[in-house]
Amino acid sequence: MSSGSAESAAFCGICRQDGEEGQPLVVVGCSCQGSSRYCHPSCVVKYAKTKTMAAVENGKLMLENIWLNCSYCGQSWSGELAATMGDECLTYIISRFICNTKFTVLALGVKCHGIYLSNRTLEEKDKAANDVISAINEWWADSSPMPASIQFEEYKAHKILGSLALERDNQLVQLNTL
């Protein structure tokens, strides 16, 4: 946090606590303003887990919005929060619902979304996309044919790798023209 008065007075829009060491506040990256603009990533993850369990208990499988979008303004998370939500969604869904192909597809999709919208370095994004591909290959290595929905998530991860390669190439071209 900078020493500006707006940020120094900020608190989490979910738990209403200040940021502290080990629990920093982040800008959520959606269109929310004021106190809703900041949160602890762990609070957003806890909220998403709670909403996921409630949706499962009610027989709903459309969980994407819980992990991808702000529940107040409806916009997608961006920056580091998008990457954190992708990481946490994949870990949580796989640990709780590994036998459910629809939930696994959801988790892989959220992870790809998080990779794409994060502000991580090209190397970190590259590793995350390769992790998705490795996880898919590991989960379905000994199984029956891979469902088309899982193949699509693998395709998206490969597309991310392709766009990262183009971005790397563009950076090299820019460096060479200096």
Image (cartoon, grey):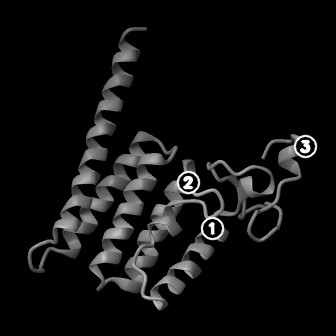
Q: Along the line of sight, which residue is nearer the eye, 75 or 125?
A: 75
CB of mark 2 within 8 Å of CB of mark 1? yes
For residue 44, the mark is 1
> Of residues 135 and 32, which is closer to you in this image?
32
* Residue behind mark 2: 77
Residue 101 at what x, y percent from top left? 27, 78
127 versus 136 height, above or below:
above
Report which quarter residue 62 is drawn in.
bottom left
Residue type at mark 3?
A: Ser
For the residues marked 2 and 1, what is the alpha-carbon distance in whole angstroms?
11 Å
Q: Is residue 63 above or below residue 118?
A: below
Is 17 on the left-hand or right-hand side of 83? right
Determine the residue positioned at 62% across, 74% down. 47
Local packing at callout 2 (Cα closer than 10 Å; few below 14, some 14-19, many 20+) is many
The residue carrying pointer 3 sits among few (fewer than 14), some (14 to 19) or many (20 or more) residues within 10 Å by Cα, namely: few
**Amino acid under disc 2:** Trp
> Left or right of 56: which side holds 37?
right
Q: Which residue sits at x=37%, y=78%?
A: 94
Of labels 3 and 2, the one closer to you: 2
Seen in the picture, residue 121 relative to 81 is either above or below; the reply is above
Disc 3 marks which residue?
5
Q: Does residue 56 appear left or right of residue 35 in this picture?
A: left
Tell me how far mark 3 sits from mark 1, CA to CA: 24 Å
Q: In what element is the residue under mark 2?
A: loop
Whichever of callouts 3 and 2 sits on the residue coming sooner in the sequence is: 3
